Amino acid sequence: MGMPSVLVLNGPNLNLLGTREPAIYGVETLDDVARLCREAAGRLGLEIDFRQSNAEHQLIDWLHEARTRVDGIVINPAAYTHTSVAIADALAAIAKPVIEVHISNVHKREAFRHHSFVSPVAQAIIVGCGTQGYALALEHMATLLAKEVAK
Ligand code: DQA
């Protein structure tokens, strides 16, 4: 049996991390986040596939592929969190644990960021921990997947 595999999926505008509203999202780039995730995954014994797209259909296609290919999903759906029934439906179609991550504390921000279509289909949500939230999500994912193996 190989290592459990986790898809780490990033939504629109997250390719601009580091230069985009640094007071809110910090100065780390998406490459830095990918590195942080790879380090966490190495420590936790997970294999990760780290991806970003600005296109809703691309995120959905990757989620469809992930249905049979991965053991869990960590997703920062970015603005699609607040708008996309389609991404929520794609996540609901996957019988694997989903952890939703937001770098900023969305509840401290505009009211339109307070609602998430994704949260009802997520096993856990990590908000406002900065990019460290990704490492925390992978840590919790490793715990969930270890429990599944033990079943
Ligand atoms: C975000 C929060 C969203 O409201 C926003 O649209 C993003 C990033 C976050 O990580 O804090 O693009 O998901």
Image: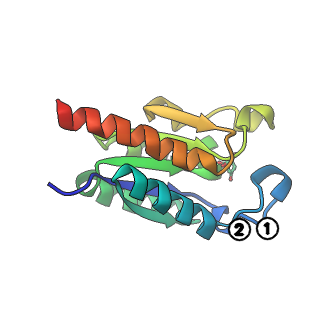
Residue at image coords 45%, 46%: 138
Front position in the image: 10 or 28? 28
Expressed as whole percent of the image width and height from the top left, the position of residue 137 reads 50, 42
| Residue 116 percent across, percent down from the top left | 59, 35
Instruction: Give left or right: position of 124 versus 54.
Output: left
Which residue appears at 62% of the width and 66% of the height? 32
Q: Amino acid at mark 1?
A: Thr
Marks 1 & 2, CB-CB < 8 Å contact: yes
Locate the N terminus by quadrant.
bottom left
Element assignment for label 1: loop
Q: Residue at x 79, y 33 (%)?
A: 108
Tell me the quarter of the picture where residue 98 sits.
top left
Q: Amino acid at mark 2?
A: Leu
Q: Is residue 50 left or right of residue 97?
A: right
Closest to the observer: 37 or 6? Answer: 37
Q: Label 2: which residue?
A: 16
* On-image quarter of the C terminus: top left
How far is mark 1 from mark 2, CA to CA?
A: 6 Å
Residue extending farthest to the front is 43
Residue 19: mark in rendering: 1
Specify the farthest residue to the left.
1
